[in-house]
Image (tube, helix red, strand yellow):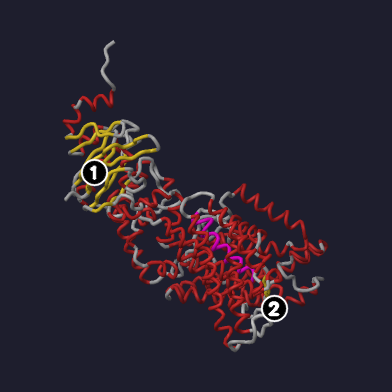
Amino acid sequence: MPLLTVHKMSHDFGGLRAVRNYDLEIEFGQIRGLIGPNGAGKTTIFNLLTGIYTPTEGEILLDGRKINGFPTHRIASMGISRTFQNLLLWRHMTVLEHVKMARYSRIRYGLIGAFFGTPKRHKEEAEIEGKAYQLLEMMGIRHLSDQVVLNLPYGAQRRVEMARALAAEPRILLLDEPTAGMNPEELVQIMEIIRRVHGELGLAILLIEHRLKVVMELCRRIQTMNFGEVIAEGTPDEIQNDPKVIDAYLGKESVI
Amino acid sequence: MSVKATIPRNRWAAFSLVPLLGWLCGALIAAILERLAGTPLALALGLPKIPALFGIDIMLKKPLLVPNAMLYSLLIYALPVAVVAGASASLTNRLAARLFGFPIGITVAIHLALFYAILHLWAGVSDYRTIVLKLTLIAVMLTLSLNVINGYMGEFSCSHPGFMALGAYCASVFTVGLFVDDRFFGAVFIPPVLGPFLFPIALILGGFLASFGALFVAIPSFRTRGDYLAIISLAFLFIVKSLIENLEFVRGPRGLSGQPDWADLPTVFLWAVLCVWSINNFVRSTIGKALNAVRDNEMAAGAMTVDTRRTKIVAFLFAAFWAGIAGGLFAHVLRYVNPSTFGIQNLAEVLAMVYFGGLNSVYGSIVGAVSISLLGEALRPLEIFKWIIIPLLLILVMIFRPMGLIAFKDLDVRTLLRPKRDPGGEM
């Protein structure tokens, strides 16, 4: 059984069908790419998978269990974690607090611990902190742990988001344009990080990306979307030479 | 070489090396001094009696006495505190370091005991001071609990006086009904000797009633973000007020009186400490930090497994609980409550304290509550002009520090109590 199955998922915004009959099967440890021009519905798919929107039609199965309609936090604690295209960080919180926060659903000390500062709480908080530091180490931003995120450079903010997403211990990681706005040097680093995360944690990764170089290098299979529909699916080579993909990106060849 | 380098260059820098313990010792000496020499000194300086609030009231009433009152404050408060704190710095640093070795609970208890002793001595001078101090401590509780909602959670709640009223009335009905021979509630039910021991139960019941009331605000308004909470909570405030006004069972608008005198200074102090402690605990835990996450970006909070709705409701109920406790204490400090106390005026005061002191901040709430309540009392001789000066101050704060005086600062007991200098070092 695949880890995540999406079957004929559609979503309407009023009269606009933003996603039409989307299908996906993803296994443990796969990296899948999702490409397409702006407005093709890629981010909407992420929002549907993470429960921010509920699909109008179709179903999403995690481990064979239907999860559409579940609240966001529940889906997240079931193992689907994500980053955001436009960096949704918490502006007044430090890097360490960001990473600790993603373990919210695993906290066992409860409200009593929160109000009265029981020994159990201190123990658990220390454990969470230890794990958070490990992740920060992995992302290479441990030295920034006390900084408020607002003061960090863009690349570091991206890493914070990635560390935060990983702290929730996902089985599937959804990365929404992880290299947006990065210079070539940062690009190489973030690709290295994605590879390491994939290698060390064995996650399934679904990647939205605009830079074909990144997708082609990281993914075995790629879906291409346009106007809410998947227009092509296949290996990087197949995708690169597919006329429909070329059309979507470059427009139709026209002879005047 | 290094010894020379660490000697502070100017006189004021020396004070930065005084630990909290040193300041407390200085204040204790000042308080004792006032008890011993306050009255003779005040009379010698031509003041009618010991100035109640640092002489400000006297200065405003009789401007001719300004130098005398200032001299009194200098001789009794400023000078002893500065001299003792400065002179004993090395001793108190060593003591603080020694205390720091104990479990943190004991260290905190010792500091609190010292602090209480100072307050007790200072307030013992007159009944007026005692009541001002009690009301200030209650204001701290209210401000801090409102800050949980308006600061940490970033919503805007207007129902705090309503929660306070629920707590006040619940606790009053409990104590007046059970322990007092009252025309309304009948004869004494439980011997009043047991009263002070059962008083916490009355307060906690009041707190729970306030939380229960808060549920009616929280359930509809936390479905979405936005201005809903402000509107619904304001409506709640008016509902509570007119409900009490129309309940003959608690004597409606005439108010409820005859509460036993159980809210003495130690009781109020202890509850205030408990309140600060538990709220500070809460906002520093990851569960409490979830409030900040929800405030700064709710979508991201949800995607990071935070149950946003539960987080908001829990925090709201928790804040209402402490407002209820504060209300219960308030009723027993004044020994009279009436529904008109818990109106817009009260709301404006609490909001002013929160925004003046600083959002998202435990220190800020304490500073805001203490400064606005003391200012309100001290400027009393100005009568109507008081309501020009205090809002003016608020406007100035909003212009120069939009988030309040001390925003975004939680209380960390360890940094607060630690010695300011390593006693084993070269100094």
Looking at the magenta stretch, what is its main secondary structure?
Answer: helix
Q: Position of residue A47 (x, y in %)?
A: 34, 44
C-alpha span from label 2 to label 1: 81 Å
Q: Chain of mark 2?
A: B
Residue name at image x 18 percent, y 49 percent: A2
Compared with residue A125, is residue B122 higher up or lower down, i.e. above or below?
below
Q: Which residue is mark 1?
A: A7
Quadrant in the rendering for residue A249: top left
Q: Which mark is residue B414?
A: none
Q: Position of residue B127 (x, y in %)?
A: 71, 76
Residue toward you, A202 or A184: A202
Q: Position of residue B333 (x, y in %)?
A: 65, 74
Crowdedness near tag 2: few (<14), some (14–19) or many (≥20) residues, C-alpha within 10 Å: some
Residue name at image x 20 percent, y 39 percent: A219
Q: Which residues lie in the magenta part? A: B134-153
Q: Is residue B280 left or right of residue B399?
A: left
Q: Position of residue A25 (x, y in %)?
A: 20, 44
Quadrant in the rendering for residue B63: bottom right
Compared with residue A96, is residue B281 higher up or lower down, i.e. above or below?
below
Residues under numbered marks 2 and 1 in contact, where contact means CB atoms less than 8 Å apart:
no
Q: Which mark is residue B35?
A: 2
- The answer to whether residue B131 is visible is no
Residue name at image x 49 percent, y 64 percent: B317
Three-letter residue code for mark 1: His
